[in-house]
Every structure is written in structure tokens, then in C-alpha cells.
Amino acid sequence: MDTAVTLRGRDFLSVADLDRSELLAVLDLAREIKAGRWQQRPLAGKFVAMLFQKPSNRTRVSFEVGIARLGGTAIALGEQDVQIGVRETVADAARVLERYVHLVVARLRHHADLSELARFARIPVVNALTEIEHPCQILADLLTIRERFGSLENRKVAYVGDGNNIAVSLSHAAASVGFQLRVITPAGYEPAAAGGLVLVSHDLDAVEGADVVYTDVWTSMGQEAERDERTAALAPYQVNAQLMARAPQAIFMHCLPARRGEEVTDEVIDGPASVVFDQAENRLYAQMALLALILE
């Protein structure tokens, strides 16, 4: 593989697991794959188990297509297939899977289960989403921002809404690659991790001057009982035309799926500033690059 950086055999549970050079290496390789300049098949003869406790569209399709394009075979396992922590312990499931496959992609409810899976499996584990982080999405986001602006350093990203797993992973990315992140959220909805180049604010004026305005759903999977309370608290933080006018040069990002009319209006998500489907497409290339560097 023509790269000076390798992630051979590494887990990827958090954006913080990669340093600046490693993150940029993933993005560089993703760009080469997307442009058709890199067509190696480092997963030939290799198998990847994909564990899903949560519904998936972009994650499952992008990983399955990417694994196939890299020459590998994906085995999708739903919650009823493995039942980790129910029918068998997480540790036992890890010890079994490591005998069959070369890597596990896991989309789990609890980050603690993901950490335990990685601790007991002697093969790499990749976080495809937990309630704490969504690092593969952030790889695609960084690729999209770099495509639009040419670089990541000193860019201003305004994340508006619930300080969820996207906000946490963006915080780690900002600290690593040097862009400025403003998390704009009501009191009580701040992200669990923030520091360095991250400003947490309750004031929508913090959107001004942003290169990127990013939002996500107000009620994530598993929070349905809190929906009314969350909607009331977050309603003033809807991304609409008036909010985007505070940052007229900004692009709009959303990890999808979107609840149109709640966290974002149709006018914005379908408007000329929106790059949400570029983000979705870039999941494929970013994840291909990540897997290629782990399983090279």
C-alpha cells in the first residue's frame, strides 16, 4: 500500500484513537479511492462481521459495498443473530467471532459493550455507532469539508442542536486536525466531551462566521420517551433560512436521517448550501480507506 501511515490491526472506537497524521492519511486515501486512482483489494480473501443492534441504511450499505470493492466478504448480523449480553456474554461473542472473521464492525446501543468487544477480540473492531460516538460518520464529514474548502485547519464549524454522539466525535476531530468547533445547544444538552478548539454556547449568534452549519436529530434512537421534552427545549435551535442567513457563506451538513420540519427545514436541506448527500456518499470512501489501512 502506497502510504507512509498504517493502522494495521488497530481498533477504531473513537475519533480520538487516531492522531492528526493518521486521520489525514485516511482522508488522503479516501480521496484517491473516490477519484479512481487507487483500486487495490487489500481485503481479498478476508471476512468482516457487521453487528447491528440499531437500524441502519447508510452504515450497512456503505460498509457492505466498500468491503466488496476492497475484495472482502461482509457478514451482516442482526440483534437476533448474536444477542450479545443476552444469549451470550460480550466476551464470549468476541472470542467466537475472532475465530471466523478478520474484523468486526459494530453498531451497538452501549459504548461499554463495544469497548468490551474490542478488549476480548484479538481482531480489529470498528465503531459504526454507539450512543457516545459516531466516528465513521465524522471521517466522511471531514472528507466533505476538505473537498469544499481545500483544508480543515482554521475552518469554523457550528454544530447546532443536541450535543449527541456527533457533537462528541466532532469535538475529538477538532482537537486533532485543528478546526474550530462551536457547539450551540440549550442548557442541559451540552456534549459529554469538549475542549481545546471547542466552544460550547447557548447563543445562536455563535453561528455567525461559520464555514459549516451542522445539525442532527433532536431525539436519537433510544430516547423516544423524551421526545416531547427534547422538542420543546430544542425548537429554538432549528436550522432554517433565518439561521443560515447568519452565516451566508456556510455549507449545511446533516448526518441523516433527518426529521424534516424539526431540526432542519426543507428549504435548507434541499437548498444550494446543503451537502448532506455528499456526506452520505463519502461514508463509502472514508470507510474503505479506514478498512484498507487496518487490514492492509
Image (cartoon, helix red, strand yellow):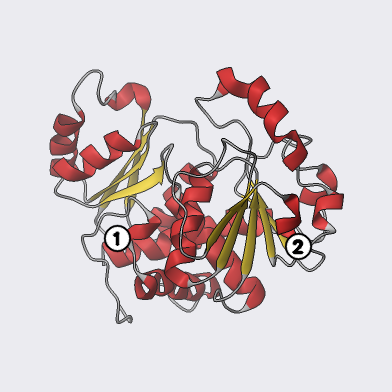
Q: What element carries label 2?
A: loop
Figure check: 237 above or below 220? below
- Say if mark 2 contacts mark 1, CB within 8 Å: no
Q: Nearer the viewer, residue 245 or 6?
A: 245
Residue 155 falls in which quadrant of the image? bottom right
Q: Residue at x 28, y 61 (%)?
A: 44
Q: How crowded is mark 1: few (under 14 residues within 10 Å), some or many (20 or more)?
A: many
In the picture of the structure, the residue carrying the numbered disc 2 is 208
Q: How far apart are marks 2 and 1 (CA)?
A: 45 Å
For residue 43, which numbered disc appears in the image?
1
- Does residue 288 appear left or right of residue 271 in this picture? left
Say left or right for 158 vs 260: left
Closer to the N terminus: mark 2 or mark 1? 1
Q: Which residue is drawn at 29% across and 35% down?
A: 112
| Image location (x, y in percent) of residue 38 | 43, 76
Say whether residue 259 is left or right of residue 266: left
Q: Position of residue 116 (x, y in %)?
A: 21, 38
* Count of labels in the image: 2
Asked if residue 62 can be seen in this view, the reply is no
In-front residue for pair 268/196: 196
Instruction: Return the x and y of residue 46 as percentages of the image width and height.
Output: 25, 54
Q: Label 1 is placed on what type of residue?
A: Leu
Task: Give the number of the mark in front: 2 or 1.
Answer: 2
Q: Quadrant of the N terminus?
A: bottom left
Of residues 205 and 6, the one nearer the viewer is 205
Q: Residue at x 45, y 53 (%)?
A: 136
Q: Is residue 124 above or below residue 142?
A: above
Residue 196 visible from this viewpoint: yes
SS for callout 1? loop
- The amino acid sitting under disc 2 is Glu
Q: What residue sits 44% from the left and 49% below the top?
A: 193
Q: Residues within 10 Å of mark 2 (few under 14, many from 20)?
A: some
